[in-house]
Image (cartoon, rainbow, N blue to C red):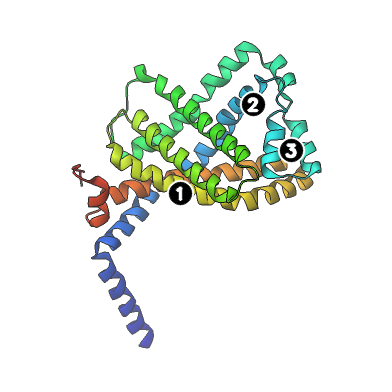
Amino acid sequence: MRLANLRERGLGFWDSIRETWVGRLLERIVRDLARLEVFDRAMTLAAQAFTSIVPLMLVASSLRPQHPGLGSVVADSLSLSEETRATLAGSIPAGATAAGSIGFFGIVVAIFSATSFSRALERVYLRTWDVQKASVRTAWRWLATVLAVVLAVLIVAFTKSVLEGAIWRGTLAVLLQIAVWTAVWTFVPWMLLQRQVAVRVLAFTAALTAVCMGLLSVAGGIYLPIAMESGARQFGVLGLVFAYIGWLFAIAFVLVATTVIGRACAEADGPIGRVIRGSEVTPA
């Protein structure tokens, strides 16, 4: 009898929460995340990033023969041990070696194959925002998306190297990273969706994504070196691949989830929705 009373009180409490704008917002977020199949979408984006963006970064590294190579850059940025560094260097050739083997045709193929990430990201945005798909004639947007993401990664890496030894280095690096990704994740969906969603709404979603990515990067600075060290000791190169794909999945999950949350907040009937939308009229 007492258990039944507690259950009734609990159900009454949640029913009262659902009657508020906060409750309706939370309910919509959960429903939209399930509808979008966020885990599947995130895994698809992570796989596309690994097979598209990473090879493009390798090509970019190969264009600078005097550069130590992408493997050394990754090892330095994660402060990996010499053993793991050697494993990583063996799996990613140095710039001069790659430059001689890739060639112009390989570079072109890598650039255009990288657009598979853009197409997967476009499908996420289209399904999230429920807007019309753009014409194939505007396929240049896919290449522009890849270039924007790669440029952002390079800028973030450059700022980390510039701030080396500076006071409050970690805080400044995270703040700059948030600023860069806010700009990128405002521009990319605005371009892919052909300006069908207001910039103000996209900017809020981008800021939410960037903040979550900034927090994730702090956690990654602790987790990723440990995961890669452990993976390299147990499975060699495959261990490094598994660890990095898992990290890309975490980033992709944040990107997809914050996009869904951003739309739900923008269309909420409470004060948060009115602040995000401003004077824009958003369909129910």
Which residue sits at x=56%, y=28%?
A: 52
Q: Residues within 10 Å of mark 2 (few under 14, many from 20)?
A: many
Which label sits in the foreground, 1 or 2? 1
Q: Are marks 1 and 3 in contact (CB under 8 Å)?
A: no
Side of 241 relative to 204 (left or right): right
Q: Residues within 10 Å of mark 1 (few under 14, many from 20)?
A: some
Q: Secondary structure at mark 3?
A: helix
The quarter of the rendered structure image containing the N terminus is bottom left
Q: Is residue 70 above or below residue 33?
A: above
Q: Is residue 263 above or below residue 131?
A: below
- Please say whether residue 130 is visible from this viewpoint: no
Q: Position of residue 243 (x, y in %)?
A: 65, 45
Sequence-wise first label, 1 or 3 = 1
Q: Residue furthest front?
A: 167
Numbered badge on residue 58: 2
Q: Which mark is residue 237?
A: 3
Amino acid type at mark 1:
Val
Residue 142 horizontal/vertical position (percent): 43, 24
The reply to whether discs 2 and 3 touch (Cβ–Cβ < 8 Å) is no
**Which residue position is annotated with label 1?**
211
Kind of residue at badge 2: Leu
